[in-house]
Image (cartoon, rainbow, N blue to C red):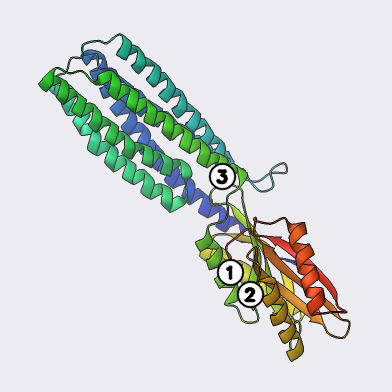
Amino acid sequence: MSDNSIGNPSGSELLKREENRQSIIVKTSVIGIITNIFLAAFKAGVGIISKSIAVTLDAVNNLTDAISSIITIAGAKLSGKRPDKKHPLGHGRAEYLSSMIIAAIILYAGITAFTESVKKIISPEKPEYTAVSLIIIAVAVPVKIILGSFFKKRGKAVNSGSLIASGSDALFDAVISASVLVSALVYMAFKISTEAYVGAVISIFIIKAGIEIMIETVNDILGRRSDPDLTKKIKSIISSHDGVRGAYDLIINNYGPEKNYASVHIEVPDTMTANEIDLIARHLSEDVYVETGIILTAIGIYSYNTGCDESAKMRDRVTEAVLSHDWAIQVHGFYVDMDKKDMRFDVVLSFAIDPKEALKIIYSEIESICPGYRITIAPDVDLSDI
């Protein structure tokens, strides 16, 4: 196998794409900041006047949402910094750090809210509501629904985990505000105070949201399995080119939202020249980027036998034997030199078996099927869906 380096898309094209993404994130976040500050101010005033812990905690939640939007802007700006000598692949992962900070703020707010709610349960205070306070709470519900839907739509459009999380949080806030309103109506109708208990429930959900955001962000930092629809699309784009029989070993490395670099192996006829392979690689690089936004940094080459029926029959026998095992997912890169009795291929193994054990079994079986051949088997990790 050999690697064929290929050119990346132009710097101006990447810069324009990043600037457009940043602009959407910043504008969306500013709208969220303004909306949440107004809601927080109104709710805080209502909570203090009515002595309602649930309303006050809901105001705190709105304030943390505003702070989260500020951090989202900071993270987007930092991630958009140009690559430098110390960070040649850019600063995209800074957005994941901003998400971690947001998660920490939400967790702190939730824990504090829960503590205060428990105190109110132990030492309750009589809440006081006015028509104005109920109207303000009621207005907050549709506002949060609209804001949450807007955030999620924009977040999905630019692949911003922070915006999507903020949208989900806002939609959940609408449910929380509705719960506070119901508690107020229950108290006014039956003189039964559920404020502290509603506050405790609210705080639990705030804590839950913080933990979920943190888990999602940690998964991004550690590295997720590539989206199967995306990997299939990339392989389909590559395999559709004349002269390419298949695409394998696709690895997508993420360096932040919308900053993905990938490598892949393609299978081409053993009669193809280096110049022909070079032209194919350049076209593949351009097509994959235009259709998916992913930059192919390298293309490895597998050659397959042409003009030899015996090698095709041998490949079929080997493939059938290997794939008879549940832990063997795919055989590719098969090539055999009939004159030198030299055979090589790759096998994709599942995580259910130790690669050393799998190779020991496969070598034993193939040597019995093709005696006298020098066999080289490369084990591949199941990194992306076949």
| Amino acid type, mark 2 | Gly
Secondary structure of residue under mark 3: helix
Is there a contact, CB below 8 Å, between mark 1 and mark 2?
yes
Q: Residue at x 53, y 34 (%)?
A: 100
CA distance separating discs 2 and 3: 29 Å
Instruction: Kindly identify which numbered label has been placed on residue 28.
Output: none
Question: In the orientation shown, which residue stands out farthest toward the top?
Answer: 123
**Viewer-side residue, 324 vs 247:** 324
List x then y, in percent, for residue 174.
Answer: 28, 36
Q: N-terminal of the two: label 2 or label 3?
A: 3
Q: Residue at x 25, y 37 (%)?
A: 143
Few, some or many residues within 10 Å of mark 1 (<14, 14–19, 20+): many
Is there a contact, CB below 8 Å, between mark 1 and mark 3?
no
Locate residue 267: give its quadrant: bottom right
CA distance separating discs 1 and 3: 23 Å
Residue bearing mark 2: 246
CA distance separating discs 1 and 2: 8 Å
List x then y, in percent, for residue 173.
Answer: 31, 34
Q: N-terminal of the two: label 1 or label 3?
A: 3
Q: Is 117 on the left-hand or right-hand side of 232?
A: left
Few, some or many residues within 10 Å of mark 2 (<14, 14–19, 20+): some
Few, some or many residues within 10 Å of mark 3 (<14, 14–19, 20+): some
Q: Residue at x 47, y 37 (%)?
A: 212
Secondary structure of residue under mark 2: strand
Q: Is 191 on the left-hand or right-hand side of 86?
A: left
**Viewer-side residue, 301 vs 345:** 345
| Amino acid type, mark 3 | Asp
| Amino acid type, mark 1 | Lys
List x then y, in percent, for residue 135.
Answer: 16, 28
Residue bearing mark 3: 220
